[in-house]
Amino acid sequence: MYVCMYPITTRVKLVQRHSVTLRRLWQTAISDDNDNVPELDKSYYIIDDRNLLRRSKTGLHVLDLIDRGAVEPDRALYQRLLKTCTKLGKLREGRLVHSHFLLQNPDVRDDLVIQNSVLFMYARCGDLEHARQVFDEMPNKDTVTWTSMITGYAQNERAVDALVLFPDMLRGGSGSRPNEFTLSSLVKCCGLIPSYGDGRQVHGCCWKHGFCDNVFVGSSLVDMYARCGFLGEAQAVFDELGRWKNEVSWNALIAGYARKGEGGGEEALGLFAKMQREGYGVTEFTYSALLCSASSVGSLEQGKWLHGHMLKSGRKLVGYVGNTLLHMYAKSGSISDARKVFDRLVKVDVVSCNSMLIGYAQHGFGKEAVVLFKQMLRDGIEPNDITFLSLLTACSHAGLLDEGERYFQLMRQFGVEPKVSHYAKIVDLLGRAGLLDRAMSFIEGMLIEPTAAIWGALLGASWMHKKIEMGAYAAQKVFELDPFYSGAHVLLANIYASAGRWKEAANIRKMMKDSGLKKEPACSWVEIENSVHVFVSNDIAHPQKDKIIKMWEKLNQEIKEIGYVPDTRHVLLFVDQHEKELNLQYHSEKLALAFALLNTSPGSTIRIMKNIRVCGDCHSAMKYVSLIVKREIIVRDTNRFHHFCDGFCSCGDYW
Ligand code: ZN
Ligand code: ZN
């Protein structure tokens, strides 16, 4: 039975254009008299864009029809085939068409139109080596040729190659004047590197060729300046666009502010409101940019407000924006809301599964991660390297040793080659479980050269389990491979200090000072009623300073009574016990906690963010505080989330 899948007009047009033979076959086919179809399978007749290149049941397609003489080949047909390949991103088929055409027309070099189509096909499908070969073989090049090559590089993020080519294009004279596509691709490249200097030069070219009020070029310029960190320039280009600007220009500027971090989020939200007042439509991209900004500062309130806005505008949770929303909830500490979003996604794909798995990993929900992974496989979603990395992290954070090792073994079965990051996770997993010797032999037996990150994982585990010699060995390896590896010096100094080996600890500190390495200043922040309050250790500049100190002193007394002992291993100073305790008292996360307790309603969850790992003493103090105040305290540090409740932490003291 023949099923008509596509509009008849498309097919008839094609058939009429390309072959009398086909038209005859076509008429036979639609007459429902299937027995009369001569020799060829009837699926040939469906030759619109989708099916032009699809092989039929007998393994033939249009190219075979040409070979059999059933279709007259001409340039127009080849061009249409190339266009289809480009549109559908079919590189393999594109190569086939190209070589077929070369066989039929060996003397093709001068045919600019066909060569341009071939070049464009290769560039668009990401085969830049073949694109470049065609490009280099062309004796005459026009604007389209140059632009195809430059755009190809830009789309595949090969910014330098594109920028290097541009001066040659300019030397080519009037036949190769850059157009809006050339220029916006080049501007994009400058934003990718990012290179402000190159950006300024290309901007100059845009002026010279009269494209500055072109919305396409202008929006790219806004985006480029924003990516280079020059928001003033981005704003100026945006303003110059005047009435020519569109949603893309707005989004470029909003995303620029949103990426800026501190303070940028508010400006982005201001622009978001202005954009709507001026009657521009909000797109998925706008929401994504704003949600990313909300999640980078961990602003749950802002994220929730945006979610509400999306719902009111009747938007469905599709594609990228659904995943960004999920990511925002997970990163702002609300894993249950993240899961709700996940369950409501219109289409679950590997990206959304990965976002959910990363969320579980950071919150230490190892079992949930394993369940989700199994579900993924049942639903036929192909896992990738990020899936495995998140899964291994989740297993490591939850202490699921057997599962972690099993999934690591499973990777190759799914065609995913383990990378350094995966190996580091296994070292981490073994290390947390206290199996440091096994971790060491795992490193020695690895198929790849161990990197600083791998030794760094062993160093972290050595610190956790107070293995001084192994820690020193691992640290030595880290310094050899990457003298600036973040945190290694501090960890090693802490290992020595905790064992009372002050001289060695002091040596490390001197080493840090000599090499100009600085400890990143610790800070914590909390969001209360839409404003973010930042606290720095031992430095209270907050208007509520006195109240905060009083609050913490009271808490400190109360938790000491129920068993909290200040862990002074975390203070690297030659001071007596009393002073060490004082130093610990005003760590930024404790100040943030005291402030949050003063300014939130009883019983509500407290969310604190920290820019480095939470220290062992604060971790212990938080557990006791959660017991006393009977509230859930969630702390996000660079490594993961800690949910403190009833005197326990979700990390099980592994982090
Ligand atoms: Zn601390
Ligand atoms: Zn914890």
Image (cartoon, helix red, strand yellow):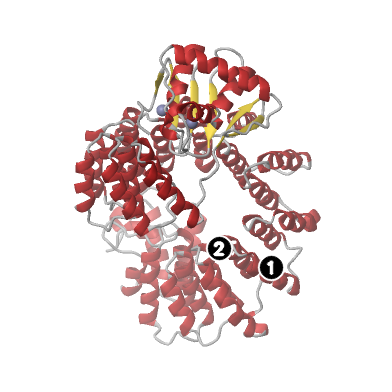
Position of residue 591 relative to residue 146, above or below, is above
Res 382 seen here:
no
**SS assignment at label 2:** loop
Residue occupying image coordinates x 40% and y 15%: 563
Q: Residue at x 67, y 28 (%)?
A: 530
Circle 1 Cα neighbour tier, 10 Å, few/some/many (<14 / 14–19 / ≥20): some
Q: Amino acid at mark 1?
A: Arg
| Label 1: which secondary element | helix
Q: Is residue 448 left or right of residue 191?
A: left
Q: CA distance from mark 2 to mark 1?
A: 13 Å
Q: What's under tag 2, amino acid-wise? A: Ile
> Which mark, by number, is residue 193?
2
Image position, residue 305 (x, y; %): 63, 29
Q: Nearer the viewer, residue 66 or 301?
A: 301
Q: Nearer the viewer, residue 405 or 373?
A: 405
| Mark 2 neighbour class, 10 Å CA radius: few under 14, some 14 to 19, many 20 or more | some
- CB atoms at circles 2 and 1 under 8 Å apart? no
The reply to whether residue 147 is in sight is yes
Q: Is mark 1 within 8 Å of ligand 1?
A: no
Which corner quadrant of the figure contains ligand 2?
A: top left
Q: Quadrant of residue 262?
A: top right
Q: Please state the total of marks drawn on the protein image.
A: 2
Please say if 240 is above or below 654: below
The image shows residue 87 at horizontal and vertical percentages of 49, 61
The structure residue drawn at horizontal position 42% and vertical position 70%, both measured from the top left corner, is: 20
Q: Which residue is mark 1?
A: 200
Q: Is mark 2 within 8 Å of ligand 1?
A: no
Indicate which disc, 2 or 1, sits on the residue closer to the N terminus: 2
Location of residue 95 in the rendering, given as x and y in whole percent from the top left corner: 38, 70
Q: Position of residue 487 (x, y in %)?
A: 43, 46
Q: Is residue 146 left or right of residue 338?
A: right
Q: Is 64 in front, or is 316? A: 316
